[in-house]
Amino acid sequence: MDSDEGDREPLSRRAEWSDVIPLPQDDGPNPVVSIAYKEDFRETMDYFRAIYQADERSPRALCLTREAILANPGNYTVWHFRRLVLQALNADLYKELDFLQQIANSNAKNYQLWHHRRWVIERLGADARAKELELNKEILSRDTKNYHAWSHRQWVLQALGGWEDELDYCHCLLEQDVFNNSTWNQRYFVITRSPFLGGLKAMRESEVRYTVKAILAQPNNESPWRYLRGLYKDDIEALVDDPQVSSVCLKVMNTKSNYIFALIMLLDLLCNGFQPSQEFRDAVDALWTSDTHPLDSDLAKAICYILEHVDSLRAGYWMWRKSKLPQAA
Amino acid sequence: MGELAVDKHVKYIISVEKKKDSFESVVMDHLRMNGAYWGLTTLDILGKLHDVDADEVISWIMKCQHESGGFAGNIGHDPHMLYTLSAVQVLALFNKLDVLDIDKVAYYISGLQNEDGSFSGDIWGEVDTRFSYIAICCLSILRCLDKINVEKAVNYIVSCKNLDGGFGCTPGGESHAGQIFCCVGALAITGSLHHVDKDLLGWWLCERQVKSGGLNGRPEKLPDVCYSWWVLSSLIMIDRVHWIDKDKLVKFILDCQDVENGGISDRPDDAVDVFHTYFGVAGLSLLEYPGLKAIDPAYALPVDVINRIFFSK
């Protein structure tokens, strides 16, 4: 709620609204899910209803939609009407962006706000691009996983451009939090779609190096492992053949901690024809300390068995993976 | 393990309509149609739908319909896909789909399909795979899927598939369990599940289960009861639900109850709301918790309601 809520003067006492008869909510005689209202909110909405029914697209209507939005930002009908008023008044849309930015923090996950923002930017066009990408960064700085903010960012880049600095931005965010899946997703978005980068294949080698570094820093991080696989989309043989991939698995397993994703990747490599050297066998064996249940001689089966136990929430999945392994020659 | 406090939850849902001076109520004004769907479907799963006066509900619902054929969130609001689906779903609960002019509703929905096969939420043009699901689910319930271009709709959804096997809101959008439910549900309803890499997606979905037994919606996020629906129903639709630990999930959902006052919250000890109460109960139904009506994972309606729509007459 806005901080000037407490100083609000009732609409019924404001001279500029004296000609309007407020319309009460029509819930019917026996409301099904009747909503209890605070008095201020009730009054704001009664006046809004009157303006909406009369289709009054005036400056005072614009002010009223602002009050109604502040009172209940989820009310999509008010947002719609505000757009009609903005159009009718040919209003300054840069001022509208300022208004949206003011209320962005308390409404960062509000669908209506984001859609309205997009509508405004569509009308402002490329001129608004740089500032919009900056403002979007501000919102993301408060919640780096805000799904709406990321979706909006992707839309701005595709509709208006501004790709040049995006990979650097992703890198900044990953330095702050390498676990952020949204950032890894954005990185993939940029390397596959930016007109300045040459596409997935061209970027692959440098991206593999980047990802391996991130993995070694925090091996129990789901996102970079998936990202690594994604770099070899439709080219699984190249994944299997890339020594950087198999070696990062080995390095992580040898630390004997946070090795679950490394085991999973090794399993996938084996299932796609990877021929492991003895080092890999030794590394896997070193992870299993039970004498009563020795590991299978088949490395892939052994890995599935370990995962059933160390990733027991997903025991059903690991048992299925084991059942799908080709029978030993 | 605790138990599901059925009577408390029923009382809570019914009391939501009578609560005064609650900010939560104020904020729900424009989405009362969704609230009706969440509350009434929960009552039906708990076997208590008969406690509600169907005629009152139906009369209010019809007042929310516009000339365009779409339904609003409440009387005096604009029409939108979101509320159109909820309206149709509630009418289906009461076996009153016959009060609808089906062509009119279908016309509204088909008019919102775009050239690329995607759907907008309303005339203002927001595009999101949520709306693809809504259009397909709604028209399927009304038995008129042929009113849209299903092939293009499916192609658009497939274009939102990511390298992890999941789906986002638009092409390139991060995989998110809610969006995945929408895409998988839409593909299931249109007989297009062959586009899903079930093993890859199944693994991504079962990775959503965290130590507490709850499910999150994306990697490295907190568990939330609503994902008990979105992740779980997706797993069931692709036939991979045995890849999670069901008992631990049941325990997590039960721990999210307010056993004193009724209702379920997003995670243990938080405030309850109707939204999470519905998803918690629906999730338990999918997990075959005893005493609950079975719910269809694609249509998010009780199975007997779906059977009535597709297998009677």
Image: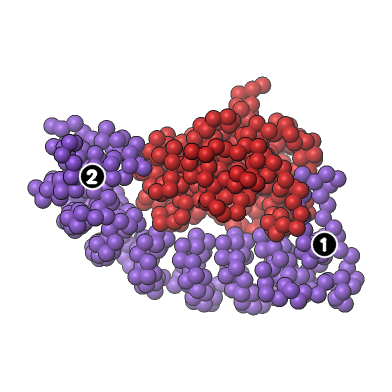
Chain colours: A purple, B red
What residue sits 89% from the left and 73% below the top?
A: A18
Q: Where does residue A276 sit, x and y in percent of width and height?
A: 13, 47
Number of numbered callouts drawn: 2
Left or right of residue B96, residue B217 in this image: left
| Residue B49 in the image, given as x and y percentages of width and height | 70, 34
- Residue identified by numbered label 2: A267
Residue at the disc numbered 1: A46
Q: Amino acid at mark 1?
A: Asp
Name the N-terminal-most of marks 1 and 2. Answer: 1
Q: Quadrant of the C terminus of chain B?
A: top right
Residue B3: give its label: none
Q: Quadrant of residue B127?
A: bottom right
| On screen, residue A314 above or below A111 | above
The residue closer to the viewer here, B209 or B64, is B209
Say which residue appears at 27% left-offset and 50% top-offset.
Answer: A260
Residue at left 40%, top 35%? B242
